[in-house]
Image (spheres, helix red, strand yellow):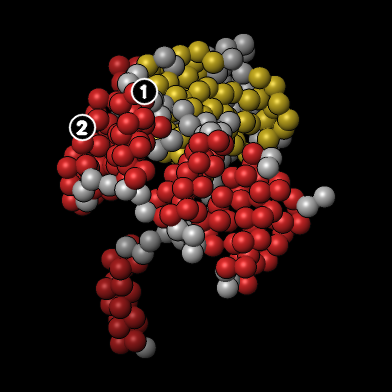
Amino acid sequence: MRLSRFVLGSLAAAASPLIAQVPPLQLPAASPKASVTQRVGMTDVTVSYSRPAVKGRKVWGGLVPLGEVWRTGADENTAISFSSPVTVGGKTLPAGTYGLHTIPGEKEWTVILSTQAKAWGSYSYDPGEDAVRFAAVPQEGPHEERLLFTLADPTDRSVAVTLAWERLRLSFPVEVDTKAVVVASLKEQLRGLPRFGWQGWNGAAAWCVRNDTALDQAEAWVERSIGMNRNFTNQSTKADLLEKKGDAKAAAQLREKAIATATEPELNQYGYQLLGQKKVDDAIRIFEKNARDHPESWNAWDSLAEGQATAGDRKKAIANYEKALSMTGDEEQKKRIRGEIAKLKP
């Protein structure tokens, strides 16, 4: 027995350092972690936080004191991240992660974004680390048992960061200069593999032209594309650019030269581009040229019929749909075209 006790005691002594290193059990958190992300243009906005519950307690002026800095959640301070520069509270902030603190008040809150994003609560909050602070007015809303952040009403340029807890709502906008973000991204992308093909340079220029931004940069990009491979697509982009810059005559001349060299798919795509711009007559002229140049293509006649149907010329549209129907062997396309004809017939 004495030997057994000695052996057992020795084993226990040897095991005790190992026992001390055993990690704690993972159990449900009182305030579970959560995050929400919304893309605005090309910018990701993310709020990461922990969600305390009301549990019948008095929240405002009780669990959360008024007039004091609050972590805006539980456990670690709530954090908000931006993948590119944004404007919050009237100030432009660099891309990065910020601690989100607030000072609740009865009629007005102070919202604070701190450069320190990894603090435990707001206990070490330092106003000297503020990136921006601004006022926001709370509103009453339906009961929300657990603290909830949403990124509401997203557009290409903004999103509303909205806090909801108990019967209170607080919201503030995050604004993004999406055009500037995209142009910066295009510059970066064109330092990689896309720089070795004409398509990348043309695509970047075309985006700028469509969005009426950085037109001088777009001109340099489209010239680079044309220098690599002159074709209908990049010449059309340059024509659109010239038109945007006010030289309609040069734009028209270049567009006619480009059309003369276009392939069937290029002309077809250009026709649909014109349809999308509500330039129906111009689109029909392009579809007509494509059908004349490629009379063996059912797709050319099908597109011409669609343009004519858009213009309200049902008779011509039906005739050209029927021509396309007689030429295609694709059963799915036949079914679709029959449906289009049925919609046009009285």
Counting from the top left corner in percent of width and height, residue 300 is at 51, 56
Number of numbered tags placed on the structure image: 2
Where residue 41 sits, quadrant-wise, is top left
Give the answer, above or below, for where 113 lies relative to 265. above
Instruction: Give amino acid for label 1.
Output: Ala
Q: Is residue 102 left or right of residue 231?
A: right
Q: Residue at x 27, y 73 (%)?
A: 14
Tell me how far mark 1 sits from mark 2, CA to CA: 19 Å
**Residue 222 visible in the current orientation:** yes
Which residue is tagged 2? Answer: 220
Task: Verify CB contact (< 8 Å) between mark 1 and mark 2.
Answer: no
Q: Tag 2: Cα neighbours inside 10 Å, few (<14), some, or many (≥20)?
A: few
| Residue 203 visible from this viewpoint | no
Residue 99 x, y percent position in the rendering: 39, 30
Residue 4 placement, left or right of 226 = right
Q: Secondary structure at mark 2?
A: helix
Residue 102 placement (x, y as % from top left) = 48, 22
Q: Which residue is mark 1?
A: 248
Q: Residue shown at 21%/48% (left/top)? A: 229
Looking at the image, is 184 positioned above or below residue 339?
A: above
Residue closest to the eye, 38 or 297: 297
Q: Nearer the viewer, residue 3 or 154?
A: 154
Helix, strand or loop status at disc 1: helix
345 to the left or right of 32: right
Furthest-right residue in this view: 346
Given this view, does label 1 or label 2 mark the residue nearer the observer? 1
**Residue at x-position 64% and y-position 42%:** 310
Residue depicted at 40% across the width and 50% down the height: 266
- Residue 330's image quarter? bottom right
Three-letter code, disc 2: Ala
Q: Nearer the viewer, residue 309 or 89?
A: 309
> 343 above or below 215?
below
